[in-house]
Amino acid sequence: MPILDNITFHKFKGLCNLELRDLGRINLLVGNNNSGKTSILEGLSVYANPLDIKEWWRISRNREQEDRSTRTSLLEAICWLFPQNTHQILDPSIDSEIEHSKLLISSSRNSRFPILNLAASYELVEELRPPRQWRGRAEEFNQSEELELMQGLDVNVTVKPTTVQLPLFDEQVEYEEKLDFQIWENEPFIRLSKKNKYQSPVALITTVSHRSESNFRLLSEAKYQNFKDDVVKLLQEIDSDILDVQILTERGARNSNRFVIQIEHKKLGFAPLSSFGDGIRRLFHIALNLPRIEGGMLLIDEIEAAIHTEALQLSYRWLVKWC
């Protein structure tokens, strides 16, 4: 049985009243460019961890992972998760009545998902705050210093869990969990997570996430769960000369604390993972994510990206087997 059978994106980014029905264990989204496929994956990722501030922050930056020099502000990035014209919302000359936007995603009661409904809203706020050089050191700030008028967002998140039956009561009871957080322009975003029982394991694989340093942690987890050998077998389907994958100190560096992921290869000896093509690195990253999302969702954007056509079929078979 799939974790979700139906889900509706009432309002999320550019999606409006989009319903996905009769979902299975494995689902493939097909559509033209800019038709909303990635937005669906991003919405599912937020829906799986709706009370995790870090997830909101991560998804707001999802499409700018390699574009740090021209990133939008964090305020604007968060706004773009909501179904409104963000440039108008952040323009102080626009009437305050539209400084409020709502996001809504819901699933079926028949799903094995911990929440039934996610609703969120934000409001543009302004406040006199200490100058930038004093931020984070408010206790040292001299009140005689000039305060700056700062713009921020007040974000409210409400989650309605799946209806539950309580002991000693015949009727079913519904609850709501709420989370409020603020972010301010030009200030570091505090990436705190609120641990709660409504979190579901989820991994969103982008076309560039295989280049991140998270592979160190993922490879360690795969080893602890006796899954690393199966990952190596997948890589061997692409390159039969691959023998193993190890985390080793950097070659030739004395007294170095720098570690790299090395592939043991029949012809190359030990070679860093970064020296292999994107196809090997992306499949490696996708495979490593499987152990940590058991019972949850693996979301892969543009699954065919960087993988040679001759390797697609065997890669899909491997993924289907483990999913």
Image (cartoon, rainbow, N blue to C red):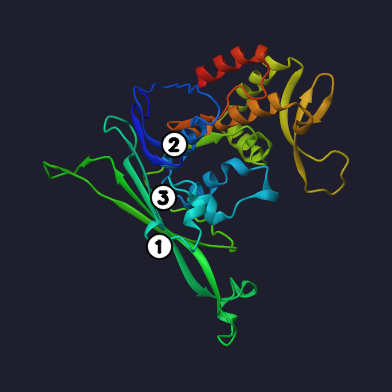
Mark 2 lies on residue: 44
Marks 3 & 1, CB-CB < 8 Å contact: no
Determine the residue positioned at 39% across, 49% down.
Answer: 196
10 Å neighbourhood of mark 1: few (<14), some, or many (≥20)? few
Mark 1 lies on residue: 96
Q: Earlier in the sequence, mark 3 or mark 1?
A: 3
Residue 152 coordinates in the image, percent (x, y): 49, 63
**Tag of residue 237:** none
Amino acid identity at mark 1: Ser
Q: Residue furthest left?
A: 170
Determine whether 22 is above or below 127 in the image: above
Determine the residue positioned at 88% across, 40% down.
Answer: 252
Badge nearest the viewer, 3 or 2: 2
In the picture, which quadrant includes the N terminus? top left
Q: In terms of secondary structure, where does tag 3 sit?
A: loop
Residue 136 in the figure: left or right of residue 49? right
Residue 295 coordinates in the image, percent (x, y): 42, 31
10 Å neighbourhood of mark 3: few (<14), some, or many (≥20)? many
Of 126 and 206, nearer the camera is: 126
Marks 1 & 2, CB-CB < 8 Å contact: no
Q: In terms of secondary structure, where does tag 1 sit?
A: helix
Mark 3 lies on residue: 51
Residue 62 in the figure: left or right of residue 110? right
Q: Earlier in the sequence, mark 1 or mark 2?
A: 2
Of 198 and 8, nearer the camera is: 8
Q: CA distance from mark 3 to mark 1?
A: 27 Å
Determine whether 298 is above or below 129 in the image: above
Q: CA distance from mark 1 to mark 2?
A: 30 Å
Amino acid identity at mark 2: Leu
Q: In terms of secondary structure, where does tag 2 sit?
A: helix
Amino acid identity at mark 3: Leu
